[in-house]
Image (cartoon, rainbow, N blue to C red):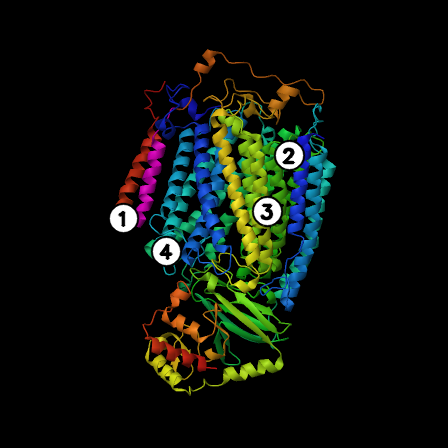
Amino acid sequence: MTNRARVTASLLLLAVVALGAGCGLVGWEWDTPMSTVQPKSDFGRMTHDIFMLISWTTLVIFIAVEAGLLYACFRFRDRPGAPIPKQIHGHTPLEISWTVAFAAILVIIGIPTIRVIFKTQEAPAATTLHVDVTGKQWWWDFQYPALKIHTANELHLPVGQTVAFYLHGPDVIHSFWVPQLGGKRDVVPARVNRIILTPEVPGEYLGQCAEYCGMSHANMRFRVFVHDKAGWEKWVAAQQAAPVEPKDDLAVKGKEVFSQSACVGCHTIDGVSAGVLGPNLTHFGSRTTMAAGIMKNTPENIARWIENPAHVKPGALMPTLGLRDEQIKAVTAYLQSLK
Amino acid sequence: MATQAAFMPGAKAQTATTGVWSWITTVDHKRIGILYGVSAFIFFLMGGIEALIMRAQLARPDNDLVSAQTFNELFTMHGTTMVFLAIMPLSSAFFNYMLPLQIGARDVAFPRLNALSYWIFLSGGLFINSSFLFGSAPDGGWFGYATLTTRQFSPGHHIDFWMLGLQILGIASMLAGFNFIVTIINMRAPGMTLMRMPVFVWMSLVVQFLVVLAFPAITVALILLMFDRFFGTLFYAPAAGADPLLWQHLFWIFGHPEVYILILPAMGIVSEVLPTFARKPLFGAPVVIYSGIMIGFFGFGVWSHHMFSVGMGPVADSAFSIATMLIAVPTGVKILNWISTLWGGTIRFTSALLFSLGFIAMFTMGGLSGVMHASPPVDLQQTDSYFVVAHFHYVLFGGSIFGIFSGFYYWWPKMTGRLLDEKLGKVHFWLMMIGFNMTFFPQHYLGLIGMPRRIYTYAADLNWGFWNLVSTIGAFIIALSILVFIINVIKTRRSGPVAGPDPWDARTLEWAIPSPPPVYNFATIPTVHGRDELWLQKHGDGHGGAPTPKPAPATAKDIAAIHMPPPSYWPILLALALTVMLSGLLISYVQLVVGGLLTLYCMFKFALEYHRPAQEAH
């Protein structure tokens, strides 16, 4: 073995080891808030099963091909004084058999794929919970027509109940994605797309727009809360109730500012205003986050937002209202009171 | 065989060979190849810098190195640059330089058209990038989905620069495509049947057909968009009854063949490099060729696998899924053929070969992750996530770029007459290999734990920070490796060892002539007996057959009688006029009209440059 060949071989080995360590799954945390490989719904599980099937199949092929490549490089390296190798042009039976082998592997992958494609796109049953999802630049609007609930950026679902999301897009194309509950589906203007799934584990899941939709695409996030039966009923009752009348002075003042300023042009608070361009704020105070899931729902964040929305979320369509500090403080108190 | 060159009057082989003017007016395919290579490499560096800035921004959560708007411009321009201004024209550099040499021709079929393609390409590239100077860099993604790119959601000139620039570039690609098809079909040396063509020529031929069939689709899409943006038509306005998926279908019926336009030339390069350094013929060459044709053909039937998430319904999903999986068959076959080429050979580990080996190793990975999202349910999780970013970088960087660098190291001595430094070449290779895997392998993981593409920022509590940092460090290692390559080029440009005509003991015709080749390429046009003609001349067929005869040496008189096309300045003027016309849409309609008239004038001058009235012709 020449010096050069030894160096080359050891470097190749090093590369394999590095790659192996890289994908060794050591230190790779899979149970993360937006993991696609920890399915928490039937839809997610079906997808994940195929993913694992293809992963193992391709991993075997990958190892075989890379090992063959490395072995050939090592075994057939040039040695000093080596004669011209035999000029082989091909081997038809060999070539036919590996072509057939590849085709056979595809059958293994293809059949379950098609089965799941049809299974996950069946028409919804009558008992399905219907949720209308509207993706807008850059936030999410959620409506439950049967329950007469209208909310934004935070979605609540009962565990074990099949849900059909109907996706509406009034502006540009977005994509509705909650990785732990399954794959994404695009929100396409002039079409109503549908995605059906049954959440199986209660919990809080993160979602995010997955189709580039302009300036603040990165800030178009949302949350999904999957409740047990009691939690779900409690949430529904709270949302169906009329908005709370503010009690303390600051919040009362805030309601006054809200109803006399440009807020009402875009936002709905039941019984106060009927704007439709921005998120429905009827029960804003009950939400954990704001501005499409990019920050916690705290008085400081609300004030920061009202002062200059585009500063918090680049390109935000809500204008700067020019409210004075004490007015902002009042509106903040009012919004927080809307539990 | 009648060539355009033969009709051109009075021109001798010797024209000016130095000075800026000689480059501006050149119609020599070799010099145009070098122009393509140098321009594309500079664009490649720009696209790389854009990538580095993005990686720096993503190195940690909630970073604010660049604004959302800047980030969106960066990923749009990175994609557009790498696809249209780097990988395609880098391949074009090899088509231009090598195709005529490999088929034993003196130039391409239409030398002035070739120059025109280059100048239009350069104008288009500069036009798109000039948007940075006006603070209006494109920001709609390289895919430019309507309705986001319509005037309503993208006011300003950002999208205009992109849309007009791509139309200019499309013209260049179409012209070059037809030129190479005619060249390959008509200008092969005697004896070079189609199945005796080197595999790089074959892959190039497939690519040119893809270009001329795929670019009209995006041109239509862009013209509709242009009409929407400038003249108020409503092709992409859902409120007026349009379906925004029209854009996606038109774009991807171009966009998927485009992927093969980017990868097949590299497959051709690898198919030249492996046999040379294993000193064996390409294993199952006909199958490799048929596989290339199959890939090109199927490439037109799979575009909707980019659209599994748009809701096409189960039947369309299934059909496009199966078609996509089928492409894995010829691709896998090729990989096994390449490994079999190495099998039983005597492999010399030159830099060129290392990059080809890197191609096989990395492209295999990109191909296999491609099989994953050929399955629509899996794709619904992976599409528009970093998993896909990892996948296509394994194909386009691990594949195309590694292949192109393999071509650089392989053909550099032919183009310059000097060898690159092998030691630096290997440093370049290993740095790039390590940097590349560090950058892109963790992105598979990031995608699987839910990181979407095209986001300029992300929250800290998602576990994405660490591997993004690793990825960023990897990107800077890639940059370092490119720096090593540049140093290698500078260092050996004047003082590198002289290559001689055939430094690698290679197999095909370009190595039968001096390095760099004379302007007329072949003093005597050779007669071809097999795919590895030069090898046959040197060593025979290895099965007892005698070496095939070398072409008879040419006398000084023969060489003096060779007619070569004279230089022309109409290509660059026509390209400029075209750019003046199209940029008029952004500035004033007066300029549009003036530019249009200039374009017409230049077209006529170009067309009639060598026209002589019948009575003058003999």
Name the side, left or right, on which A122 lies relative to A339: right
Query: In the image, are marks 3 and 1 on the same chain?
Result: yes
- Circles 1 and 4 in contact, beta carbons < 8 Å: no
Report which residue position mark 4 lands on: B228
Foreground residue, A205 or B228? Answer: A205
Report which residue position mark 2 lands on: B286
Residue appearing at x 49%, y 37% in the figure = B90
Chain assignment, label 1: B
> What secondary structure is found at the residue carrying circle 4?
helix
Quadrant housing residue B363: top right
Which amino acid, mark 4? Asp
Foreground residue, A147 or B60? Answer: B60
Main secondary structure along the magenta-highlighted residues: helix
Which amino acid, mark 1? Tyr
- Structural crowding at the residue carrying mark 1, measured as other residues with C-alpha within 10 Å and reported as few (<14), some (14–19) or many (≥20): some
Chain assignment, label 4: B
Chain assignment, label 3: B
- The numbered mark, 1 or 4, whose residue comes first in the sequence reads 4
Chain assignment, label 2: B
> What secondary structure is found at the residue carrying circle 1?
helix
Q: CA distance from mark 3 to mark 4?
A: 42 Å
Quadrant housing residue B151: bottom left
- Is residue A70 located in the magenta-colored stretch of the structure? no
Foreground residue, B129 or B181? Answer: B129
- Structural crowding at the residue carrying mark 4, measured as other residues with C-alpha within 10 Å and reported as few (<14), some (14–19) or many (≥20): some
